[in-house]
Image: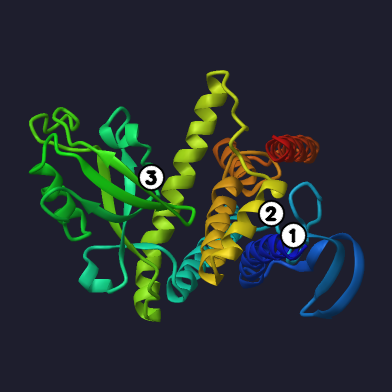
Amino acid sequence: MLTILLVIGILVALIIVHELGHFLAAKFFRVKVEEFGVGYPPRAFIFGKWGGTEYTLNWLPFGGFVRLFGDVGEGQHGPGSFVDKSRSVQAVILIAGVFMNAVAAWALFTGALYAGIPRLVENAEASGAAWLMVAEVLPGSPASDAGLAPGDKILSISGRSGSPALTPEAVTEFVRERGGEALEITYERSGAPTTVTVRPAHAVIREAPVQPAVGIALVLVTTEPLPILEAAGQAFGSTYNAFKNVGSGLWRVVKDAAGGGPALQDIVGPVGLVGVVGAAADSGIGSVLALAAFISVNLVIINLLPIPALDGGRLFVLGIEAAARRNASRFALRILNAVGIAFIVFLMVAVTYNDIARLLA
């Protein structure tokens, strides 16, 4: 139950941050904001009315919304009307939501690094509490045959003539000089230690066929907290990597769909998110903040998709209107929004079905 409340809290907070972006941009450009709602109608009660805006709490706790005077398709004109503003101003107000989610992702990654989450370091001396982790395993290599997998924590490596220091460079040099020798590697996975025997072989690494190797890439990882300013600096890189990973993942989904593959099977919906957030909560506040940052990045990319009813779809329509030099009809915009909402509901049902199917399996 606590995990479910945490999931709802994260989603509501991130959506409210998104709507706050629209709200602030609209206020800046003197567009009348009729309502800023937390949750979705039906309305529970009104906090109050300030500056011409009603602030409300609604019964469906799945996000929030901003209701603008003269929004697209409403046909309302006059001082403070959204549709009466230039298309460039409308675009800025629309983009402001995803911009706020991007800023929120950076702030959350900053908090996560300040609290302490796994991160790569260059050397053990720099952190003092680093461990060696398997980052990649080559298919068909001695390491793969022995059962090693990405994410395994290396506890020790030993041969007939001793053991190397647990750094990527020392282990690579140690393995390179012991072609064919039996090496014992002890690693930890899910808290359980395991020892396997691996023999370095030639032709494992395509670029260096004469170099004995076991077929693993190693990195140093630490969970030591960073000072706040250093955390803020490193958070830019974390945010960039999150955008790159989410973007490439979405592209794979699109390619799978185009090729007739199961496009939605790996997408996690609200039900699956409960398990993911629960696992993060078990790892500490830093992991929860990092996961929230990753979800915020997802919201940025999803909202920029050219799907009607999303910011990206509305920006796409603005672009068409600018090219055609005339406004789209109110009827067409309402139809597009209805189609977009129906499509989003279909996706939510589909991913929720997949979540439940995974749980039952």
Which mark is first along the chain, 3 or 2?
3
Can residue 100 be seen by looking at this rendering?
Answer: no
- Secondary structure at badge 1 equals helix
Q: Residues within 10 Å of mark 1 (few under 14, many from 20)?
A: some
Q: How crowded is mark 2: few (under 14 residues within 10 Å), some or many (20 or more)?
A: many
Tell us which disc is closer to us: 2 or 3. 3
Determine which residue is flagged by label 1. Answer: 4
Determine which residue is flagged by label 2. Answer: 274
Cβ atoms under marks 1 and 3 closer than 8 Å: no
Query: How far apart, in angstroms, are the residues tagged by discs 2 and 1?
Result: 6 Å
- Secondary structure at badge 2 equals helix
> Which residue does the image show at 49% across and 73% down from the upper left?
111
Q: How is the image coloured?
A: rainbow
Name the amino acid, label 2: Val
> Which residue does the image show at 62% across and 32% down from the upper left?
265
Name the amino acid, label 1: Ile
Name the amino acid, label 3: Pro
Q: In which quarter of the image is the C terminus?
A: top right
Q: Position of residue 109 (x, y in %)?
A: 47, 66
Q: Quadrant of the N terminus?
A: bottom right
Cβ atoms under marks 2 and 1 closer than 8 Å: yes
Quarter of the rendering containing residue 199? top left
Which mark is first along the chain, 1 or 2?
1
Closer to the camera, 73 or 221?
221
Quarter of the rendering containing residue 16? bottom right
Q: Where is residue 10 in the image (x, y as percent from the top left)?
A: 66, 63
The correct choice, above or below, for 41 with respect to 337 in the image is below
Determine which residue is flagged by label 3. Answer: 150
Can residue 162 be seen by looking at this rendering?
Answer: yes
